[in-house]
């Protein structure tokens, strides 16, 4: 039986050898590729492994990540003014910048234009800080000699609240949180004071004036998920905690004056007490503060920044680069800082900060990142650009990559 089977196999083998099918071009190419392939089975140079996307292979050859577009650089925008710009923020219909002499600029579809020439009270007091409500529909700005006001994006309505509570010192910083008509506002001055404000029934209600630190200039304010943060020029950092969750659906403060004009006297209630949270052994003066969902960043002199972990209550100093840091913004793993002398730095995915080559040597003072894709989905679309502003009216812009996850970069 076995002998007959072996004989049959020999006959079949002989028949196959006699008929020998001709090889195709594809078979020859496969044979050539197999001969050239390294012994370990990996793909040779220029070859895409089975299942690889050719576009992925091409991107990998130059070090780019699959699906990433080339990151555009920072470019000079045409500025309508030569006056120094101190702050910039994204509104619902694009970026706004404020500056010297009460200047307020807006970036529309046709570029930047002057919106206000002389400030909210028709004076030439410099505007030093600007913030926006969460929906981007109202912009608050503050500056020299108590200059304070807001601009409603939807109807172009301007309101002047200069020198609230008879405060005529220079407002150095402002922070805004909440929707238009329900926002909470903080403004800080060069005497180390913070004035709180709650908008109720469309009108501002002024609260107590408090002094979180020792009277040093409060150079930065921001609204974070935990509350308002402030920093001063003596290395102090402070937190005003958010109201308890149980009260977040109620008005944060009622007005006991029952109709008395809002700018005559304070209410008999005060905000949550400000707490000093750092920075122990601070090495430099502070200029700006920013809070996102995970961290708090402080911009300081001599190129030094600090990062705060609210969960662990820990501060970590970081050397960013040369120059005095003037403004800092972050989102997720990304952080950007601007500094004197036309310097701009961006943190990579590690602890390193990389210097960008920017087309100006003017000091950069304000920074705003484009709104996030989540904001756009919620109907808060704005210009997809990051913006930095500074001395001499300089404006730098960088288009955002497709799929960017950046949130609103200024409050």
Image (cartoon, grey):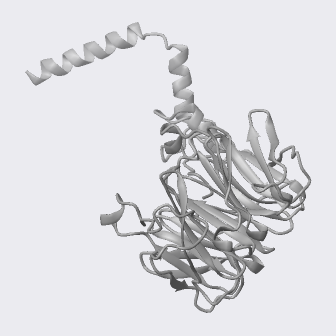
Q: Outermost residue, bottom direction?
A: 281
Against 145, residue 24 (above or below) is above
Q: Quadrant of the C terminus?
A: bottom right
Residue displayed at 52% across by 27% down? 31
Residue displayed at 85% across by 65% down? 363
Percent x, y of residue 265: 57, 73
Q: Is residue 28 left or right of residue 152?
A: left
How many dots with numbers?
A: 0
The residue nearer to you, when weighing 257 against 217, is 257
Percent x, y of residue 385: 69, 45
The answer, for residue 345, to whether it is visible in the render is no
The residue nearer to you, when weighing 89 against 174, is 174
**Image quadrant in which you'd find residue 327:** bottom right
Percent x, y of residue 204: 55, 59
Q: Outermost residue, left direction?
A: 1
The residue nearer to you, when weighing 388 against 36, is 388
Q: Outermost residue, top direction?
A: 19
Q: Is residue 265 left or right of residue 355?
A: left
The answer, for residue 352, to whether it is visible in the render is yes
**Image quadrant in which you'd find residue 255:** bottom left
**Image quadrant in which you'd find residue 20:** top left
Residue displayed at 63% across by 36% down? 46
Percent x, y of residue 253: 42, 66
Against 276, residue 311 (above or below) is above
Q: Quadrant of the N terminus?
A: top left
Residue displayed at 19% across by 22% down? 6
């Amino acid at each position: 039986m076995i002998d007959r089977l072996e004989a049959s196999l020999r006959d079949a083998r002989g028949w196959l050898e006699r008929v020998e099918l001709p090889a195709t071009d594809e078979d020859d190419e496969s044979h050539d590729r197999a001969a050239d392939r390294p012994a370990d089975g990996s793909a040779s140079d220029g070859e895409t492994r089975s299942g690889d996307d050719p576009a992925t292979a091409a991107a990998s050859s130059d070090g780019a990540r699959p699906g990433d577009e080339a990151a555009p650089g920072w470019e000079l925008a045409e500025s309508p003014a030569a006056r120094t710009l101190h702050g910039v923020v994204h509104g619902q219909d694009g970026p706004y910048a404020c500056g010297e002499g009460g200047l307020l600029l807006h970036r529309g579809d046709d570029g930047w234009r002057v919106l206000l020439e002389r400030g909210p009270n028709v004076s030439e007091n410099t505007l030093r800080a600007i913030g926006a409500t969460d929906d981007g529909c109202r912009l608050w700005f503050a500056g020299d000699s108590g200059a304070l006001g807001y601009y409603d994006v939807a109807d172009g309505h301007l309101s002047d609240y200069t020198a609230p509570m008879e405060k005529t010192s220079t407002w150095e910083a402002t922070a805004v949180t909440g929707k238009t008509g329900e926002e909470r506002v903080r403004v800080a001055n060069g005497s180390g004071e913070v004035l709180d404000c709650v908008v109720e029934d469309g009108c501002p209600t002024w609260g107590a004036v408090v002094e979180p630190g020792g009277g040093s200039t409060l150079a930065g304010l921001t609204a974070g998920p935990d509350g308002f943060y402030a920093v001063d020029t003596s290395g102090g950092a402070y937190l005003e905690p958010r109201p308890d969750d149980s009260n977040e659906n109620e008005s944060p403060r009622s007005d006991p004056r029952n109709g008395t004009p809002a700018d005559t006297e304070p209410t008999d209630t005060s905000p949550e007490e400000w707490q000093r949270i750092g920075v122990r052994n601070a090495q430099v003066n502070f200029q700006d503060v920013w809070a996102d969902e995970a961290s708090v960043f402080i911009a300081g002199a001599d190129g030094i920044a600090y990062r705060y972990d609210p969960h662990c209550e820990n501060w970590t100093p970081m050397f960013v680069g040369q120059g005095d840091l003037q403004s800092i913004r972050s989102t997720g793993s990304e952080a950007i800082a601007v500094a004197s002398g036309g310097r701009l730095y961006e943190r990579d995915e590690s602890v390193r900060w990389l210097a960008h080559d920017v087309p100006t040597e003017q000091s950069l003072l304000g920074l705003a990142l484009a709104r996030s894709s989540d904001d756009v989905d919620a109907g808060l679309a704005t210009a997809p650009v990051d913006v930095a502003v500074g001395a001499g009216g300089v404006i730098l812009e960088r288009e955002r990559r497709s799929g960017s996850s950046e949130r609103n970069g200024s409050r």
